[in-house]
Image: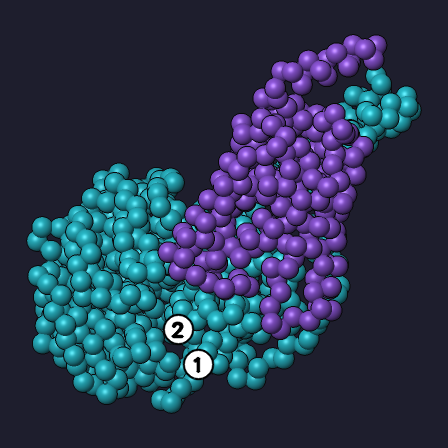
Amino acid sequence: MMRVPPILVLLILSVPLAQASTDESTWTHEFDAGYITTKPLVIDDTVYVRTSGFWTGSDDRPIVAAFDVHTGEERWRYSSQTSLQHDMSPLLFVESGTGSCGEWGALLLVGWNDGKITAHSPEDGSIIWQNQTEVNLLGITGQMAIENDRIIVPTRTGVASFCLANGVQLLEVDTGNNGWRNGVLITEEGYVIGDESGHLHTIHRNGTLSTTYLGEGKIRHAPIDTRHGLFVHMQTDSGSSLYLNGSLIGSVGGSPAIPLMHEDRIYASTSNEWISMLCGAETCSIESIESFRSSGELNLRTYNSTVEIWAPSNTPEGGWGVFNQTSLIRMEQTPFDTYGTAAPGFSQGVLALGNDAGILQVTHYDSSQKKVDSVDGSIVQTIHYIAILGLFLLLCRSFSVHDWSQMMKIGSAFFLVLAIAVVPELSVNLAEKTATQSEVEWNSSWPEEWKQTQVIVFEIDGEERAIGGLEPQDNVYDLTLLACQELGIQSQVEQQYLGAYLVAFNESAGDGWEFTIDGKRSPVGMSEAQLGESSIVEWRPV
Amino acid sequence: MLSAIGTHGPTVSPTALLFLHATLFFIAVWLLIKPQRDGNAWLWPLFLLVAIASISRIAMSFIPNVMPVTILAVMVGSKFGVRRGFAFAVLVTLASNAVLGHGWWSLFQIAGWASVALVASWISVHDENGNLSMTQLAFSALWSVPIFSFIVSLSIIDSGMSAFEFGLYLANGLLFDALHFFGNLFFAMWFGQWFERLLQMNQPTHQLVQQESEHVSAL
């Protein structure tokens, strides 16, 4: 019996433990002038960022620049000589494609406050095409959107659309009112924008216009399309008002941020609070409020199957508040914190931050996080192995002294611990071996750029939509959420007893949804279903 | 309970869901308050065991199929009869699934554990004097598994599923049934006597005296 502890100790020491390493790398770039007021874009190996400011005759001008995401080396920059006011329209990246008005390569699209829209080559920043929109002191300040082969631009006085291939204007509608930071929402009916007079305009694709008056205030974001109608967070003289389907549903603090929606929640913020709203069966209502000050952009990422909402803190202390679905979980700080309105830019393992100091900071964090997770898992495994070994030794001892009742007790514990270790993996292996397999054919209509990347296909209401070339994700859940964001598909996910469960796409629940990876049904749920670099995931109704 | 949209099974409105939960709860209460002949003091031990079963099921939810609920259903069914056993099954399922998540499967979990309690009332793990037999309890760790597993698996059946496919589904779950068995055996061996002491908590003193005198006379 006295030999047992030393044997166990020896075994502990002989089990290799993963060592955590601080493999985090960060670089920063400080612009000579201007603020970073909109989120940096991280696309593949490049970070794109724009500066903004109020330029009064000096040599400084607003810049759009591209940096190597790993080294911070500046690849190119483009400076506008004519835009003089704050440029806050978010950058827009579009993959190459073809459409009725032509064919285009990858483009970085920029809307300027002088009304220009420029399409740049992501490689060297050269202008592929450009065009001019209506200006009334200010020009393009809101978020643009892509619809098939065209870009939809919220202009100062309305909406315009341009062909992605050559920049030819396809549509221009004047609403008669001015807008500012009023992004455009694309719906089935048409393009929806707000304005500085509390109106919501729907511009139909045939160019006709219909307008709804919400109330006294300024609509400074793209409306959000919920199943209960359009959501608008309107700035008013006394604070801000929340509207759903034209009805007032709440009043909160002033200077509202640009809200965002994810699954069944809407996240918003003001100069007084951060707000989480839950959209249930009947309506959307405020579920949680945290005291916070954020008036710019919000961004969201799914990290280890956990949703994080990031909001820039528009205070002298700066930083970014990181929230889960209902509350603040931490503040993310940097050495250069100050006022800020730009949301972070995310990509796989990359975090890009910018603020009013005009400093861009890019951090690679994934490798260290993965190693920490690996250490945690390794410790649990080690404890498990020790338990199995220890119980086995005690079982042997009970057997040797013919203590049957003790043997039953220890034996039950031993077999249970052993089964916990063995059964889940054995079950997965067995299921994979017996799973019906089918070949996944490469669809010839998919772009060549998607080869060797993860591709995901959705069959919704008989229509197939696919996307590839996204940042590689570890599991089906993360890839699905990312793809839905890119394709504008509304997904409804429930966290159930057995894990995350996909309830509906675009409110189409049917008899349920199932996914395959490379033609094979997965024996585990979407959070655990691991993906390779070129996996093809297909979501189809049951 | 049936609001798990998309899971196999019907969906109901929140009002119907509330009605269903309330109905099940009142059935459990009715079963508990209905008088029984044997006069066993059951109320507080039963509630205590419901709490232990629910909390441990929630706490151990990360290990599939390992929980003391099945063994407790056996012991409650054997000690207090099928009615109390059914009430135990309802209360534990309602309480633990409030955290873990209700669904169409909840009804089948209730039926599964209630069936285990029913069988345990026939194949008792207590002898004529009401004492726990560890051998019988260990054996119950085995026979309770296929009963519960089969009934819970019925929740997956829909109009498109053949008997063969259902059989395949059951076969795929055999490994987890084995885990369930080992878990039951573990709880039986390590906690069986302690659960039994809780079941006998409010036992009338004349029965305790009777047992004590028998013990003395045995010496």
The CA distance from mark 1 to mark 2 is 9 Å
Q: Residue at x 56, y 59 (%)?
A: A526
Q: Quadrant of residue A505?
A: bottom left
Residue A422 makes an appearance in the image: no
Chain ID at mark 2: A
Mark 1 falls on what kind of element? strand
**Height in image: A465 above or below B195?**
below
The residue pinned by badge 1 equals: A97
Chain ID at mark 1: A
Pointers 1 and 2 in contact (CB under 8 A)? Answer: yes
Mark 2 falls on what kind of element? strand
The residue pinned by badge 2 equals: A94
Q: Residue type at mark 1?
A: Gly
Residue A214 makes an appearance in the image: yes
Q: In the figure, the cyan chain has which letter?
A: A
Q: Residue type at mark 2?
A: Val
Q: Position of residue A305 (x, y in %)?
A: 50, 52
Q: Position of residue A13 (x, y in %)?
A: 74, 29
Q: Quadrant of residue A347?
A: bottom left
Q: In the figure, the purple chain has which letter?
A: B
